[in-house]
Image (cartoon, coloured by chain):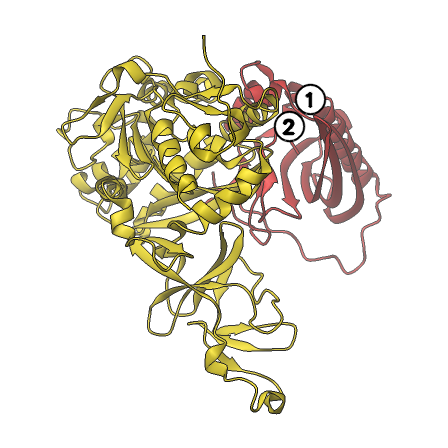
Chain colours: A yellow, B red
Amino acid sequence: MIENVMGSAPDELVREDRVAGRLYTDPELFELEMTRIFERTWIWVAHESELPKAGSFKSTVVGRQPVIVTKDRKGVVRTLLNRCRHRGASICEKPSGQVNGFTCPYHAWSYGLDGSLRGIPYPDGYEGVMEKRDLSLGRLRTESYRGMIFATLDDDAEPLEEFLGDARLWIDRFMKQGGGYPIKVLGRHQFSFRGNWKIQLENTTDGYHFPIVHRSWMASVDSETADMMSFMTDPTCTTHALGHGHSVMQMVPEHSDLDLDDRSEPLQGRFDDVVAELSRTLDAAQVRKVVRAMHGTGFNLNLFPNVSMSAAFFRVLRPVSVNETRIEHVAIGPDGPPELAVVNRERLRIHEHFQGPFGFGTPDDAEGWDRVQRGAAAAPAMPIMVNRGLAREKPSPEGWPTSHVTDETGMRAAYAQWKAMMSDD
Amino acid sequence: MTETVTEAAAPAVPIPTTDPRVVRTIELIWREAELLDRKAYEAWDSLYTDDGFYVIPIDPEAERFDDILNMVYDDARMRRMRVTRMTEGYAIAAVDAARTVRTVSRFVPESVSDDEVIVRSAQILVAYKRENHHLWAADLVHRVRLSPDGPIGDRIVHKIVRLVDSESAVPAAGFLL
């Protein structure tokens, strides 16, 4: 007999093996999540390649609050509230670009890239009323690790590196897919679904759904790629809980650390043309490195609460309301010499094949999530089960709770963090 | 894939939409629209040439699609796999897809010859699924190869669907534009 999850306080709604269905449907819980999680912890806002030089900017959100991430004249990356200090108008509505500063369209108050208020038209009306230095744009604490830029609205939040903790090792490994070059953002798909953000948070650590929901994609790829993703019964494929709600799901463990290569693995035949073209200018070892990393790393690193470093892309989630979520699938590739264009072209086609609103994978995921949201409206106290693999979950040598890749260890980790943050006044 | 699309500058004298070659092209575009609304994807695919491209870009200005991320950038191989996906019954998004009704109008012939016609148009599509209507508005460009055998042999060389909201979030779709 599976007991219902009664009560309404956050610490009553999450148990080790189940969570209440109302976690997806209760608007009051959603409001609490915005203040207790999204306005308190580290939220991923950009990759460093999106801010290549002074004056580069990117618009995004932290929780529901619009922000602009900028690189100022001194090269310092800033996260600024996208809100004029005068009457609250947004000062930037472009997704990204290159500017000298920002001017509010309403009364032309102008701000520098560091957020300082530079100019006010007809300033005599403010004489004896206020000083410009007191009205900079709101600034968020901004820190980065290996090019991943995060911001927080909480000045007292722990340092980013502490928050990432053991996930840092996996970020280091993820970046090896550049094949010796840094990685850069190549483009992004954006789509929305009618469901709660946590349904997507769970999905990036859900190996169990893969061969079922993605049967259509599996049927369309070459046999080598399909074999690579056949992890359902492979005991070496595991999921680790890394602390702070982060987890890593290893679908292709032989590609978890791309530096480990005994050269016994043949490169996939589908990349023969790429290999031939690269071999005209690059040495064989370098060619092997970038081609072997063509599908990215062999794992999804799920960082609580809004970003996943997922095989060969970033998945970024943005809660809009209790039952609406926007997702970005950010394509990445090596940032190297022009000869690598052929590699990034191939990576773009691989990304288009699975991801985005018309991919062979994403629409099927979104259909599944939509159905979860609709179904969860029935019996809000009836639990959502996250108990798969609980009996076989053991600590790894590093001390990380570990189970099979199809198990729900990563979801349990995320919900434990949710519970801790939501219960903390 | 090395598709290059160079859209001709507007001709000094507008090409009338009553030109018989343009009429043939518009009829093909309407036939395509109806096949897509009926989800007759096999028949739809047969309207394309073997070197034909079906593209839904993200970047509204893009004319070349190789080195950028697109929503769809299908050559014949990808298009056929997509048709299989939409029809074989495994893809839950396609099995439970929205019903769609689209109109294509505001035709502007861009170039015309006895072999090939390029026509720009506007497409308004309404998709309905589970109590929700969603509006998809797009500018289309069709490049159509005219057949010496008459309209039955006319084929699409490329179709580019430029959604008005291509740079924003759109719903994940279980149908084609």
Task: Please give the name of the residue rendered at 51% of the width and 27% of the height, measured from the top-left corner.
Answer: A7
Q: Classify residue B139 as left or right of residue B71.
A: right
- Against A407, residue B103 (above or below) is below
Identify the image quadrant of residue B52. top right
The residue under label 2 is B175
Task: Please give the name of the residue rendered at 54% of the width and 77% of the height, measured from the top-left corner.
Answer: A110
Q: Classify residue A124 as left or right of residue B101.
A: left
Residue type of the residue flagged with mark 1: Lys
What subunit carries mark 1?
B
Find residue A262 and name its label.
Answer: none
Counting labels gives 2
User: Is label 1 in a helix, a strand or a loop?
Assistant: loop
Residue A100: x %, y % from top left: 47, 74
Q: Residue furthest right?
A: B18
Report the quarter where the N terminus of chain A lies. Answer: top left
Q: CA distance from mark 1 to mark 2?
A: 8 Å
User: Is label 2 in a helix, a strand or a loop?
Assistant: loop
What subunit carries mark 2?
B
Q: Classify residue B151 as left or right of residue A204.
A: right
Few, some or many residues within 10 Å of mark 2 (<14, 14–19, 20+): many
Few, some or many residues within 10 Å of mark 1 (<14, 14–19, 20+): many
Along the line of sight, the residue nearer the viewer: B58 or B35: B58
Foreground: disc 1 or disc 2: 2
**Mark 1–mark 2 CB contact (< 8 Å):** yes
- Against A136, residue A47 (above or below) is above
Residue A290: x %, y % from top left: 26, 40
Specify whether residue A86 is in view.
yes
Residue type of the residue flagged with mark 2: Phe
Task: Please give the name of the residue rendered at 48% of the width and 61% of the height, measured from the top-left corner.
Answer: A68
The residue under label 1 is B39
Residue A127: x %, y % from top left: 57, 91
Nearer-N-terminus badge (1/2): 1
